[in-house]
Image (spheres, rainbow, N blue to C red):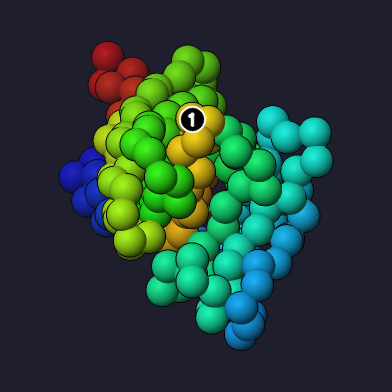
């Protein structure tokens, strides 16, 4: 009996859902033209909220497809130099941050620093130097940016950048399957204790 319940518990646990990654690609914003367009101080996509947080007049923008600064896909940039952004889930659920694509817009070199704020407290930091040149989007990957309640990144002054294809995933809550398995294990333990008591 105990062996059977253990097998059932293992089977149920094996179907617990994994985190499903989504990519914020901003393609729904695409505009055919030669200018640039503002989306305001914040933008929401795929259950995530992106906010420009350090400007007195925040306005995230993107270059239209015929603009010479268009990097090949729709990417956002800050309305002012040396700004910062915050990313968080709309639901407030913890999330994992995997990667982002960046393209340099300035004439000089510089770095961008990313700080993840863990849901349980504490932070993690990772910085990158974005190559200068031809506005090509480059992928940067992250390690340990898991179970975050928010992510923030800051560009240096005169180091403006475009960003695109942000890969994130909501951390799944304990599933019904996991709760059921826990209940089965508790029932088995209780039954074993009663049987042992009856044999005395």
Front residue of this view, candidates 40 and 161 = 161
- Where 78 falls versus 192 (above or below)? below
From the top left corner, tell me how far across and down residue 185 is, in percent: 36, 37
Q: Residue at x 54, y 79 (%)?
A: 65
Front residue of this view, candidates 197 and 49 = 49
Quarter residue 188 falls in: top left
Q: Residue at x 42, y 34 (%)?
A: 112
From the top left corner, tell me how far across and down residue 20 is, in percent: 41, 59
| Extreme residue toward the front, this view | 107
The mark tally for this picture is: 1
Q: Residue at x 80, y 33 (%)?
A: 56
| Extreme residue toward the right, this view | 57
In the image: residue 31, left or right of residue 126: right
From the top left corner, tell me how far across and down residue 145 is, in percent: 38, 34
Residue 18 shows in this picture: no
**Classed neighbour count for the residue bearing mark 1: other residues with Cα under 10 Å, few (<14), some (14–19), many (≥20):** some
| Extreme residue toward the bottom, this view | 32
- Where 133 falls versus 193 (above or below)? below
Front residue of this view, candidates 70 and 76 = 70
Front residue of this view, candidates 174 and 198 = 174
- Where 193 falls versus 180 (above or below)? above
Quadrant where the C terminus lies? top left
Q: Residue at x 50, y 43 (%)?
A: 160
From the top left corner, tell me how far across and down residue 69 is, in percent: 49, 66
Element type at marker 1? loop
Instruction: Give the labeled residue for mark 1.
Output: 156
Residue 162 shows in this picture: yes
């Amino acid at each position: 009996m105990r062996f059977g319940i253990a097998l059932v518990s293992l089977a149920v646990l094996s179907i617990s859902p994994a985190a499903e990654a989504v990519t914020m690609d901003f393609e729904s914003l695409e505009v055919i033209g030669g200018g640039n367009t503002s989306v305001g101080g914040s933008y929401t996509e795929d259950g995530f909220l992106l906010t420009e947080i350090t400007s007195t007049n925040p306005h995230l923008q993107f270059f239209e497809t015929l603009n010479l600064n268009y990097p090949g896909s729709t990417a956002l940039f800050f309305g002012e130099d040396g700004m910062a952004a915050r990313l968080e889930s709309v639901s407030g659920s913890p999330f994992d941050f995997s990667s982002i694509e960046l393209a340099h817009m300035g004439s000089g070199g510089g770095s961008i620093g990313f700080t993840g704020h863990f849901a349980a407290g504490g932070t993690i930091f990772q910085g990158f130097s974005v190559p200068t040149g031809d506005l090509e989007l480059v992928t940067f990957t992250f390690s340990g940016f898991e179970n975050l309640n928010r992510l923030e990144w800051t560009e240096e002054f005169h180091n403006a950048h475009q960003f695109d294809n942000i890969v994130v995933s909501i951390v799944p809550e304990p599933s019904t399957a996991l709760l059921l398995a826990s209940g089965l294990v508790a029932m088995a333990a209780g039954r074993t204790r009663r049987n042992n008591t009856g044999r005395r």
